Image (tube, rainbow, N blue to C red):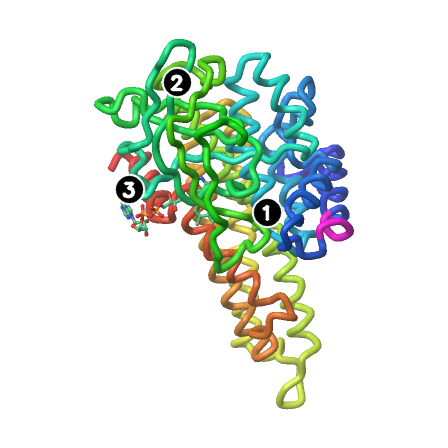
Amino acid sequence: MRFDWSDHQRELFDAARQFGRERLSESFGDESGLRRAFSRLGEFGALGLTVSPRFGGMGLDALTSARTTEGLGEGARDLGVLFSGSAHLHACAAPIDRHGSDELRRRFLPRMCSGEWIGANAMTEPGAGSDVSTLETTARRDGDCYVLDGTKSYVTNGPQCDVVLVYATTEPSHGYLGVTAFVVERSTPGLVVGERFETMGLESSPIGSMYLDGCRVPVSQRLGAEGEGAAIFSESMHHERTGLMAAWCGAMTRQLDMVVEHARERRQFRRPIGKFQAVSHRIADMKLRLDAAQLLLYRACWARDQGEQASVEVSLAKLAISEAAIQSSMDAIRLFGGSGYVKEMGIEQMLRDAVPTAIFSGTSEIQRDLVAKGLGL
Ligand SMILES: Cc1cc2nc3c(=O)[nH]c(=O)nc-3n(C[C@H](O)[C@H](O)[C@H](O)COP(=O)(O)OP(=O)(O)OC[C@H]3O[C@@H](n4cnc5c(N)ncnc54)[C@H](O)[C@@H]3O)c2cc1C
């Protein structure tokens, strides 16, 4: 077993961290922020990390892609744009690359990798969150088109997307196995994008509902065969749970550095607060959580790169990263005292950006369920 990185992986990580510090250190929460951020992410190659080079991507394996995203997360202050960029990559561009025809790949991927087009994915519905076997959005075949009807909720990038991967049921009686995936352009008549939600964190990542009303999508824009949508979705979630979550490992590294520096410099009772065991042990626990989360992440990516499904490894990594990010962000606020509570310092933002990690790409409870299932329970 080897724990070192190749020169290529090291170079990419360093470049990503540097790029994050220099080009992603401002806030992208304004109206044009996401477009600005996407063109920068596109320049770096972050929007096509795992996409085939033939269509504008970098063709990286899961481990190298995750390590690069980790570098971006360590450098950048704004996790919202990394979340938006990674969702665009892992849940829209990559599935098109893996399952689309050459015509679909040529049409969408170069523009998605460059950041000209923003991608989204729409599975969740008002009545189907953790349980996506009960989709109410239907796709009915009509000649050389499918007609899509239904409502989707919590679509990341939805309010600003140019293309969205929509999951709908073509065979309601088959539940999860009746789900089919469609690549739908924003400009398609019958697709209406709802207002952006106000959210607790990830402020530069727009999220909202999406409405399909007699939306006609050509058969050529179906991804995979009828009934293959659930497998495509599940595969994209595997990639999100590692490739996207890597950004939070990077953010936790930056957070730990800030906390250590603060504990060395802040003096109370005539000594640095880091000299109090109650403080230093809290920081040691943050380090333990971070290293455990990183190692689980690298193992899951490595297993995926060996061709294993690695469902348990992936869920353990996602669970460890999200729960560590929430707990350590809470610890960071305590360690910074009153200044941790003040927005300007950027300490409390990490907690607001960490909370949604226990919900998206499958909640922490669902990850535990998947682990238990993998253990035969
Ligand atoms: C920031 C963010 C971005 C998102 N982006 C997207 C996106 O781009 N596209 C998309 O389609 N969706 C997206 N989602 C939606 C997300 O996938 C769902 O919110 C998530 O799957 C949970 O569904 P729900 O909100 O309906 O909660 P519910 O499924 O109603 O769950 C509520 C609670 O019940 C628990 N629960 C449910 N079932 C079980 C069970 N069997 N065992 C134990 N506990 C259970 C859950 O863990 C949770 O604690 C996003 C969500 C967030 C927060």
Q: Is residue 167 above or below residue 357?
A: above
Q: Residue at x 48, y 28 (%)?
A: 189
Of the pair 299 and 91, the residue shown nearer to us: 91
Q: Is residue 76 above or below residue 127?
A: below
Q: Where does the image place residue 241, in percent across and percent down from the top left?
A: 48, 40
Q: Residue furthest bottom?
A: 269
Could you tell which of marks 2 and 3 lies nearer the N-terminus? 3
Q: Residue at x 59, y 13 (%)?
A: 103
From mark 3 to mark 1, how far is it between C-alphas? 30 Å
Residue occupied by mark 3: 127
The quarter holding residue 118 reads top right
Task: Find out if the beta carbon at label 3 lies less than 8 Å from the nearest ligand 1 atom.
Answer: no
Give the extent of the magenta segment: 20-24
Q: Where does the image place residue 117, in percent across and percent down from the top left?
A: 63, 32
Give the main secondary structure of the magenta stretch: helix
From mark 2 to mark 3, how far is it between C-alphas? 22 Å
**21 within the magenta span:** yes
Residue occupied by mark 2: 146
Question: Quarter holding the N terminus?
Answer: top right
Q: Is residue 100 left or right of residue 112?
A: left
